[in-house]
Amino acid sequence: MKRLNWRGALGKMFVYLQIILMLFLILFPILWMVLSSFRYNVDITAYPPKLIAPVTGENYVNLVQTNNFGRIAVNSVIIVTGSTLLGMFLGVPAAYAAARFKKQNWAFLILLARMSPGILFLIPWYMVALAVQMTDNYITLILTHTVITMPVIVWLMISFFEELPPEMEESAMMDGCSRFQVLRLIAIPLAVPGIAVSAILSFIFSWNYFLFALVLAGFKTMPLTVAAFQFIGTSAVNWGGLMAAATVISVPPMILTMFLQRWLVRGLTAGAVKG
């Protein structure tokens, strides 16, 4: 009995060590980013690293005053909101069709867009945008970011729609509802948790995506992720400004995740994981 207890205690200790290690690997870069955003460049790059250094808010002041931060933040919101809404508009009906008509194989082609490297789409999109003179244009950026968001929406929503009882939809169709009415009046209201989860994840993926905007955006439509890249120069890096920008960019996804954590977990376990 004592031997079993000893093994059980050792097992629990191993689990706690794993949790501590995972938390350290995940949280340490975030903590380092936030602390560095309040330090001078000379202290950030000091060797050996300084645990205690003078604190400054200069990096945030420069970010707001000299980099047109408000306009750039609005650009990010426009692009992310537009791509999320367009992805939901196209992805939800596509997921419903794939779930009800057993076309997951076709939906897999959409998933390939998410699994493939972004550079695969970037060059064709850039050539087309250049030909029609739509670089540095919100519509172009929204369409390209939809390539990232829609596969996530489709595959999350397929699992949710498959969990819905088909008997309710069959009864509605026997009463005269069309397939579109069944989707609008029955399937979508019942899948609201899945729609919320899909929208949140789409928002986060689009917010953090960098590659398309780096090439397709210009001064007028530059989002936050590209603006942060400007702190990296050819001969020097403004680490304080870069850390301040990265901290600001990280805030919206973190707030969304923290406040909607329960809904997010419930939605994922209700449908996505079961698929």
Image (tube, rainbow, N blue to C red):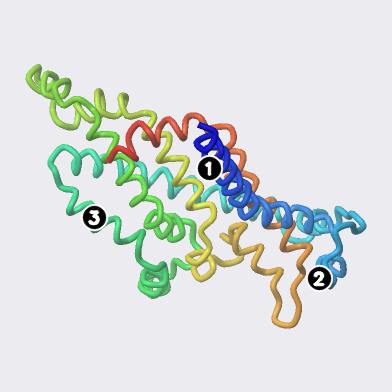
Dot 3 lies on which element? helix
Which residue was labeled with disc 1? 11
| Dot 2 amino acid type | Thr
Amino acid bearing label 3: Phe
Specify which label sits upstream in the sequence, 1 or 3.
1
x, y percentage for residue 34?
Answer: 74, 53
The quadrant in which residue 92 appears is top left
Sort mark 1 into few (<14), some (14-19) or many (20+) by Cα contacts within 10 Å: few
Which numbered dot is residue 241?
A: none
The x and y percentages for residue 152 are 36, 49
Q: Is residue 235 above or below residue 29?
A: below
User: Which of the two discs, 3 and 2, labels the residue nearer the N terminus?
Assistant: 2
Instruction: Label 2, secondary structure: give it.
Output: loop
Residue drawn where x is 42% and y is 37% of the image: 197
- Mark 1 or 2, closer to the camera: 1
Residue on which disc 3 sits: 108
Q: Which mark is residue 45?
A: 2
